[in-house]
Amino acid sequence: MRFKNKTVLITGGGTGIGAAVARRIRQEGGNVTLVGRRPEPLRGVAEEIGAAVIAADAADSAAMRAAVETVVETFGSLDVLIANAGGHGVGPTISMSDETWDLAVRLNLNTAFVSARESLPHLIKSKGNIVVLASIAGLFAGPDAAGYVTMKHGCIGLAKSLARDYGRKGVRTNSVCPGWVTTAMADEQMEVIVDKFKLKNVEEAYALVTKDVPLGRPATAEDVANASASWLRRKHR
């Protein structure tokens, strides 16, 4: 029960990594609020684990400010922000539309920035934590993913800036940079690889993209949740 009496806000909490982090935090006693644009998957996770739900766009300043205030009014404080919302921005630069680029900015970088900005006053009070879910694409450029790669590099830069500016005020910030993770979003990309390389199925696609991974497999959402929670436990031990 390491997170007992701690309140955690998770953006993009209805599926994949966000949902897995929510389960892990609840298992260890934390109060969890899930934020996302689609209420149906949020409610499904919330009913499973006993979490609160706020349907909101994490890139919308007013909506995120209201969400944070609701969390604080409900639980009395905000201790942790998991800036997990993201995705999209796949394709080579030469053919990427303005709309695809703008969506990559909004879903990956704006969501992290806005949620952090609106949470910071309360995190300073609680001497809390921020975890920014970035990607290995924030460290290395994968092929034909200019928008996603650029925004995940930006997420790491944001995390560094938050750590530099607010660490001395008691707010610790870390970024987690997974490779391929078996989520519904990644499954969609595997279907593209199946078609491109004439593979039999999604499993063969995952095997192809992780052939140089030391464990020889993609990560699971639970693997990433464990890594994310480990940063938080260091503070709350």
Image (tube, rainbow, N blue to C red):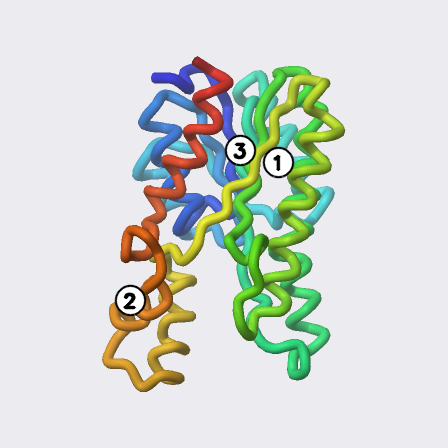
Which residue is label 1 attached to?
67
Instruction: State the CA–CA distance, disc 2 to disc 1.
Output: 40 Å
Q: In the rendered image, which quarter contains the N terminus?
A: top left
Residue at the image point whose x is 54% and y is 58% from the top? 137
- Residue 193 is situated, as x and y percent measured from the top left of the image, at 39, 77
Q: Callout 3: helix, strand or loop?
A: strand
Which residue is label 3 attached to?
9
Decide: marks 1, 3 in contact (CB < 8 A)?
yes
Q: Residues within 10 Å of mark 2 (few under 14, many from 20)?
A: some
Q: Quadrant of residue 19?
A: top left
Instruction: State the CA–CA distance, disc 2 to disc 3.
Output: 34 Å
Q: Is residue 184 left or right of residue 35?
A: left
88 to 228, vertically: above or below: below
- Residue 38 is situated, as x and y percent measured from the top left of the image, at 49, 54
Q: Earlier in the sequence, mark 2 or mark 3?
A: 3
Instruction: State the CA–CA distance, disc 1 to disc 3.
Output: 9 Å
Q: Callout 1: helix, strand or loop?
A: helix
